[in-house]
Structures are given as structure tokens and as C-alpha cells.
Image (cartoon, rainbow, N blue to C red):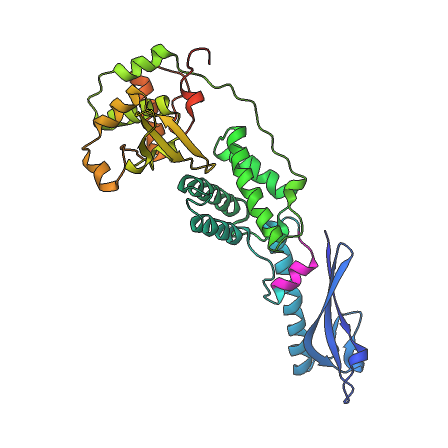
Amino acid sequence: MRLTINFILKKARQKANGDIPVYVRFTMNGKRVELSTGIFVHPDKWDDSGQQVKGKTDNSRIINNRLDKIQMEILDIYNQLKSTEGDFNVIAIKNKLLKIDESKGVLKVFDYYLDSILAKLNKGYSMETYKHYKSSRKRLADFIKFQFKKSDYSLDNINYKFLDAFDIYLKKEFKVHQNTAWNYHKHLRRVLNLAVSMDYLQKNPYSKFKVGLEETHREFLTSEELSKIEEKDIQIERLSAVRNVFVFACYTGLSYSDISKLNDSHLRIGTDQKEWIIIDRTKTNNRCRIPVLPKAKVVLNKYDDYPKNQFRGLLLPVLTNQKMNSYLKELGDICGIKKNCLSASVKLRYLFKFGNG
């Protein structure tokens, strides 16, 4: 990736007084750019082999200094791009030289995507989805700052090598599991699809870069283990509340995002004269009808007069997903359950294996 710089006279644009404009031509990988320097010289005073104006007059020194500065500026830009961008071309050098920013930054498009999610909350997107994408945006920004020392990165320069470096960064710096990395890539892939749709990018580089999912083996709680959690005497209010919410999830099959928005309007009396939960699921927006089993009702009764619930209009004292997961691990420790299946966000089939499964 060698760069050559030459100064040439554009004789076709000779002025009436005989002066000819000096152009700078820089070539790399077989492609070249020619730009006007704004300098005019008489052809008799131009040294083509030396690439400068002949003579030692003040005017000659001034023009030659200007030419030297142009050459140095192009070389500085080339070296800067070589150390930060990886793959680039002469157009990138030209744009930087002329201070033209034709390309969009990937983080700017990511921010647009986040704003779009916010605008569609509860209409296809949940707050949890927004938080997950925001987390992916932060990881990507950290990577760009770490790898390129930049606050954003041009979409034009995102390629296989960029995605591979991002994948390595996630696994090396944050020790993430393959499937966690897959989620980060999934979010970035969708953002780049948006960039293609907005005509900021011709093709999504993920068409060549593939990220696989590893098969996981979920552990289940047995009925005995669930009983141990239910019956455990817990004096710490935060752990007691998390335990109750978890037990409620086991007997309803509702996800964290659904339980976190559960309110009086979701409780109905059915034709069988029994209480039911009727709710539109957050992720699918499908209407779901769930019978309120006796043990789920016990949990609801515990928080009938809970001040925080009444203030927020909710049925249960649900904390953030991160805190729920952290406290559930603590709950597992005090109950002597070491299985990796206590999670606030997984569904019923991952929490409790009923009967024959």
C-alpha cells in the first residue's frame, strides 16, 4: 500500500499570461487523485524532475515551501489513516485533505437505531430490548476507542477485518461466551442493515463474516429444589422479594419483562369464575391467558398493600433485571442450589421442569 505524490502542470488550463496551474497527484493501489494546489507558475520556471520552481528568488522559495507543505500534509494523512483505519483508499486521503466528511459513523447510525426503538416502546420493542442494544452500543464504542483511538468509525471502512477484531476484543477483553458475543454481533448486524437501507452502505459486511451459536444445555430446578426456595426463611427484604417474584414466574411462566409491567388491569375473572392473567407478551405482542394458580396467588396477596407497588401501580416489587439476576445468585447460594438456572429473564421451561417436562 505505497503512496506516490507528484506535482504536475495542467497545460490545458494555461492562463492568458502563460502561467499554468500546478496540480498535486497522489496514487495508491493503482488509483489516483488530482487536486489543484491553487498555485500558478510559468512553464519556463518549472523543474519537472525536481518537482519545484526553479531559482532562488523569494517568490520561488515561497511557492516551493507551499508545495512542500502540501506534500507533507498528504503524507501525514496517509500515515494517520494507515495506523488507525487499516483499509483505506486515495478517496479517503482526498476527503480528509479537503476536510470532507461524506461517510457516516457507525455509532451515529447506532444512535439513530436506539432513538427508533425508544419511539416504538411497547409497540414492538420493550425497554429491556432498548437496554440490551444500548449495552451493545457501549461495547462497540469501547472497541473503536481501544482499537482506533477514535470516537466513531466510518461505515465505509467496516469490513471483515473490523468485525473479526471486534469479536476478538469481546472475547479477550471481556471474556464473553460465544453466545454472548453472538448477541453483540446480532445487534451490530441489524444496525448495519439499517445503514444499507439508508443508502449509507452498499453491502453489509456480515454477509461474509459469520458468527455461530454454541449449543447450550439448560439445567432445570426439580420440584424439591423449588420447594426449598419457597420454604426458605429469609429475613432480608430484598432477597425475600426477589424469591417471591421468582416463585411467581415459576407458577405463571411469565418472563421478567412481563412481570415487571404486571398491574391490576391484567387480572380478570374468567367464565369459570376463577382469576386469570390476561396480558400481551412484551416480545411477541401475543395475547396470553394464564390461570392464577394458588401458589402464584399467595405471592400476589403478599404485596396487596405494598407501598412501592401502589405508588408505581404494579402488582409485584420487581427490581432491574441486573439486580434480580445478582440477587437470585445470592438466593441460590443460601438455598444450597448451585445450578446455573436462576435467572430473572428466562421463561418457565428454563426455571422449573414440571412432571414429565
Q: Please say if 3 is above or below 318.
A: below
Q: What secondary structure characterizes most of the magenta part? A: helix
Q: Nearer the viewer, residue 96 or 122?
A: 122
34 and 182: which is toward the camera: 182
Q: Nearer the viewer, residue 297 or 23?
A: 297
- Seen at 59% across and 50% down, the residue is 84
- Eyeballing the image, is 304 above or below 80? above
Percent x, y for residue 255? Answer: 40, 30
Tell me if residue 94 is in the magenta stretch.
yes
Q: Is residue 34 left or right of residue 95?
A: right
Residue, far bottom: 17
In-front residue for pair 253/102 = 253
Compared across the picture, whether 129 is left or right of 162 comes to left
* Total marks placed: 0
Q: Is residue 191 above or below residue 344?
A: below
Instruction: Give the extent of the magenta segment.
Output: 88-96
Q: What percent of the width, then of the height, locates residue 278?
A: 37, 33
Quadrant housing residue 345: top left
Identify whether 170 is placed above or below 221.
below
Q: Is residue 106 left or right of residue 301?
A: right
Hey, which quadrant is residue 237 in on the image? top left
Asked whether residue 36 appears in the rendered view, the answer is yes
Residue found 45% across the figure and 48% down from its top: 120
Asked if the magenta segment contains residue 201, the reply would be no
